Amino acid sequence: MTRHKIFDMSFASIYPHYVAKAEKKGRTKDDIDLVITWLTGYDQAGLDRTIADEISLEEFFDSAPALNPNAGLITGVICGYRVEEIEDPLMQKIRYMDKLVDEVARGKKMTSILRGSA
């Protein structure tokens, strides 16, 4: 299997783009943090630490406390691929995160984005 360049990109380099995308649509950094912590199990301090340490996306997900058990409910198309059909587990997690950020930016209700979780 081909190793994707995105795996080695730092989470810190991608995170500001997520925030900017949300803010451009009237949402907040807190909204982005909420969906990322929901997906990964990081708390705010852990998320801040991953940004400060500039760890790769691979390390980000390898070190994540626990992928949310409802992550499998994230479906749809992102970057031309159906997230539920992505075979590489790491790429699927990255695309789950991308999909959540897109949903925040599109203005979906947070309960819907978090798949019914509070």
Image (spheres, rainbow, N blue to C red):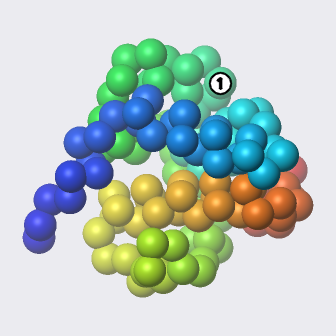
Let me know if residue 63 appears in the view. Answer: no
Q: Which residue lies furthest to the left in this view?
A: 1
Q: Residues within 10 Å of mark 1 (few under 14, many from 20)?
A: some
Please state if 93 lies on the left or on the right of 38 as rendered: left
Quarter-wise, where is residue 100 in the image?
bottom right
Which amino acid does the dot numbered 1 rest on?
Gln
Please state if 84 lies on the left or on the right of 29 as rendered: left
**Percent of width and height locating residue 108:** 83, 64
Q: Residue furthest front?
A: 24
Query: Up-down: is 108 above or below 64?
Result: below
Residue at figure coordinates x 84%, y 46% from the top left = 26
Q: Mark 1 points at which residue?
A: 44
**Percent of width and height locating residue 109:** 88, 61
Query: Up-down: is 101 above or below 75?
Result: above
Let me know if residue 109 appears in the view. Answer: yes
Quarter-wise, where is residue 13 in the image?
top left
Residue at figure coordinates x 43%, y 29% from the top left = 12
Residue at figure coordinates x 20%, y 58% from the top left = 4
Q: How many marks?
A: 1
Q: Is mark 1 on a helix, strand or loop?
A: helix
Residue at figure coordinates x 37%, y 77% from the top left = 86
